[in-house]
Image (spheres, rainbow, N blue to C red):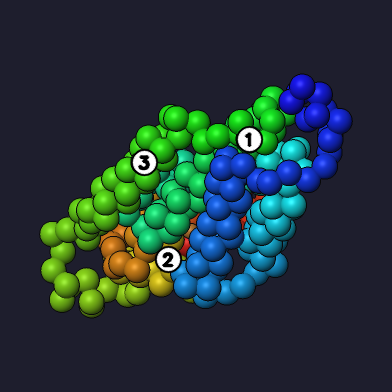
Amino acid sequence: MEATMERSQTGFRKPVAALGKLTVATLIGIAVVVVYVMVAMIGTVDPMGLVFSAIPLLFAGIILIGWRWTPLLGVLAGGLLLAFVGPFFFLHLMSTPSEPMFAPILVIVALSIVAVVAGVSATVQNYRYAPVDRRMPRWLPAALVGVVGLVVGAILVATIPPPSTAAGVSPEVLAELPAFTTKDFEFQQKEIRAKAGETVALRLENADPEAHYLNIDELNVNAPIPAGQTSLALFKPTKAGTYTFYCAPHYNKETGEGMKGTLIVE
Ligand SMILES: [Cu+2]
């Protein structure tokens, strides 16, 4: 009887069940974190970021209307975000999880996963059960506590500072070296000059909230420049010539676009 009533009302608005509300909450959370990253951490509001925060809010609003297919929008938003943010997340995980950007990215990944799981479950419930039977699954609170625990644990582990990349070099000596600075995802010096057979020592400084690297393939240079820190690069070119230096995560070798410059060895 209930089933036929349900079918006769196909497509009509229903009160949003617990799982639908959870999907809405995660979408709002995603929008908040994206805005936080833009304003508090990067300091700029770019159109791409606005789209990333506006779409989850729009979807949350549509889900609240109550059509039973709408939680699928949570799956869509969560899935898209995972596709966009996922690669950055793994890059951070592999290189330097202590960076300031790690925590918000981790939270966005966690919220996206919850949005996908909650959205799928809510849609299944909406089609299978009458509104009164669309209850919060018994495993859900435990699963959410688990997700929160994992996120908090990972952030705590990430706040343990990594060993300094200038370890063993006194601050006074480091201060005397020529500075080589990254800012706004660019090398401030587009050119480094050196003499063949002489050691080059640079004080690397990073003003960005994300780690950069100084890479020079021919000289086997791969010096990390952690966010907001000072580090050291030491290398000795033996042959005169022109070399490209670049930042591996922010340079595309195929197109030659991104963070790069020229090392001229005389
Ligand atoms: Cu970089």
Image quarter where the C terminus lies is bottom left
Q: Which of the two discs, 3 and 2, sits closer to the camera? A: 3
User: Left or right: 160 with respect to 129?
Assistant: left
Tell me if 106 is positioned left or right of 250 in this view: left
Q: Nearer the viewer, mark 2 or mark 1?
A: 1
* Spatial separation of the CA atoms under disc 2 and disc 1: 48 Å
Residue in the image at 29% along x and 45% along y: 153
The reply to whether the C-beta atoms of the residues labelled 3 and 2 are less than 8 Å apart is no
Give the residue at mark 1.
Answer: 132
Q: Alpha-carbon neighbours of circle 3 within 10 Å: few (<14), some, or many (≥20)?
A: few
113 with respect to 128 (left or right): left
Residue 249 location (% of width, % of height): 50, 51
Q: Residue at x 30, y 67 (%)?
A: 229
Choose between 219 and 255: the one closer to the eye.
255
Where, by quadrant of the figure, is residue 159 drawn?
bottom left
Q: Which residue is mark 2?
A: 209
Q: Give the Cα separation between the discs numbered 3 and 1.
A: 25 Å
Q: Which residue is mark 3?
A: 145
Residue at 17% x, 58% y: name it.
167
Q: Secondary structure at mark 3?
A: helix
- State whether residue 196 appears in this view: no
Closer to us: 20 or 257: 20
Q: Is residue 127 left or right of residue 218?
A: right
Kind of residue at disc 1: Val
Q: Between 235 and 215, which is closer to the camera in this rendering?
A: 215
Mark 1 nearby-residue class (10 Å; few <14, some 14–19, many ≥20):
few
Quadrant of residue 9 in the image? top right
**What secondary structure is found at the residue carrying circle 1?**
helix
